[in-house]
Image: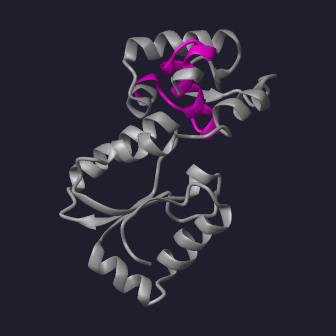
Amino acid sequence: MEILGKIVGNGARVKIMRLFLLNRGKGFKSKDVAKRSRVDIEMVRKELRLLSSINFIKKRSKTSLDWYFNSAFQYAGALEELLVRSDTLNKEKIINNFKSVGRIKFLVVSGVFIKNNNSRVDLLIVGDKLKRGKIEAGVRRLEAEIGVELTYAIFNTKEFIYRLNMYDKLIRDRVIHTGIKKGLKFGILNTIEL
């Protein structure tokens, strides 16, 4: 994101543009953009004015408070390629985001991280003594970086191994097999013998 921020202007703009590119057809009020992207409301208003001036976003009507992505924006494809289809987040950043949540034994990214819209889960966390509140805060930070809501599942080690051995559909089909087929970013942290 640091490099993209320098190319595009700043990190806040990258987050806001990703939010609109990944949520086409969905309207956002300024305060919703600030909350979802974790950017100061004044900075959001400034960026929305700038993005509106280049027709990246628009309002449906003059009285509307909601901003929408302008599907007729001439550089939509190029920006999507740069901001969305490029590597979403690197491995170290994801792992560091969950360092203080307990003893993580297995962390799998799928779904939006590997550009697979058919996956039921984007993030699977397995471990012991996991702190749900800290995990949720970490997920919110990732959502702000990426610009899209994440679906995630949390299991303790014993339950995960049981589900794995029972050929649980979520574990086997959706997370593991999808990740293996798509390749690279499948299991970014693994201390469990599978």
In the image, taking residue 48 as reference, residue 140 lies left or right, namely left
Q: In this view, does 120 lie above or below 48?
A: below
Please state which of residues 15 and 96 is positioned toward the viewer in this rendering.
96
Q: Position of residue 151 (x, y in %)?
A: 45, 57
Chain part drawn in magenta: 5-31
Could you say which quadrant of the image residue 59 lies in?
top right
Residue at 65% from the left image edge and 21% from the top image edge: 58
Color theme of the render: one colour
Q: Residue 23, can we see it?
A: no
Q: Is residue 11 magenta?
A: yes
Q: Where is residue 175 in the image (x, y as percent from the top left)?
A: 53, 69
Q: Where is residue 36 in the image (x, y as percent from the top left)?
A: 42, 34
Residue farthest to the bottom? 166
Please state which of residues 41 and 18 is positioned toward the viewer in this rendering.
18
Residue at 48% from the left image edge and 46% from the top image edge: 91
Q: In this view, does 42 lie above or below 20?
A: above
Q: Residue 104, can we see it?
A: yes
Q: Is residue 156 magenta?
A: no
Q: How many labels does the image show?
A: 0
Q: Position of residue 2 (x, y in %)?
A: 51, 22
Q: Is residue 146 above or below residue 150?
A: above
In the image, taking residue 159 as reference, residue 50 lies left or right, namely right
The C terminus lies in which quarter of the figure?
A: bottom left
In the image, taking residue 86 as reference, residue 108 lies left or right, namely left
Could you say which quadrant of the image residue 27 lies in?
top right
Residue at 77% from the left image edge and 28% from the top image edge: 78
Magenta region, main secondary structure: helix
Please state which of residues 158 and 21 is positioned toward the viewer in this rendering.
158
Residue at 35% from the left image edge and 77% from the top image edge: 160
Could you say which quadrant of the image residue 80 lies in?
top right
